[in-house]
Image (spheres, grey):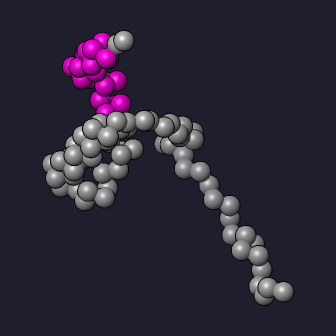
Amino acid sequence: MPYGPPPWEGTKPARKSRTKSGTEPVRITVDLTPDDYQLLNVWLARASVELDQPVSSMTLARGIKAMIRAAASDNVVNDVVLDLLRREQP
């Protein structure tokens, strides 16, 4: 017979993280080629140097979120992304 309370007693259940607006974030999965994955990691390493932040703080999710916001809010970035999508059309 084990001693002590079960591990879940006296602890709060884990809460999901929420955004500033109070909504739960949506998780997505992105399949990258090895070359694109390497390119993203190199970009994040350069960004950490440029921002003088530890490379450990430059997560894949943080970089992708920033890129999404840039493409949505900047017409030049938006045009570059649209051009890339046009070139990748089957």
Q: Position of residue 73 (x, y in %)?
A: 31, 24
Q: Position of residue 53 (x, y in %)?
A: 23, 56
Task: Classify residue 54 by image quadrant.
Answer: bottom left
Q: Is residue 59 visible?
A: yes
9 sits to left or right of 19: right
Our reading of the magenta stretch's main secondary structure is helix
Q: Position of residue 37 (x, y in %)?
A: 31, 41
52 sits to left or right of 56: left
Q: Is residue 70 magenta?
A: yes
Q: Residue at x 54, y 46 (%)?
A: 18
Q: Residue at x 24, y 40 (%)?
A: 39
Between 12 and 62, which is closer to the camera in this rendering? 62
Q: Is residue 89 magenta?
A: no
Q: Is residue 78 visible?
A: no
Q: Is residue 10 above or below residue 25?
A: below
Residue lying furthest left: 50
Q: Is residue 75 above or below residue 15?
A: above
Residue lying furthest right: 1
Between 18 and 77, which is closer to the camera in this rendering? 77
Q: Residue at x 68, y 61 (%)?
A: 13
Between 2 and 33, which is closer to the camera in this rendering? 33
Q: Quadrant of the C terminus?
A: top left
22 sits to left or right of 80: right
23 sits to left or right of 5: left
Q: Position of residue 19 (x, y in %)?
A: 50, 43
- The range drawn in magenta is 67-88
Q: Residue at x 48, y 42 (%)?
A: 20
Q: Is residue 1 above or below residue 37?
A: below
Q: Is residue 57 above or below residue 20?
A: below
The total number of labels drawn is: 0
Q: Quadrant of the N terminus?
A: bottom right
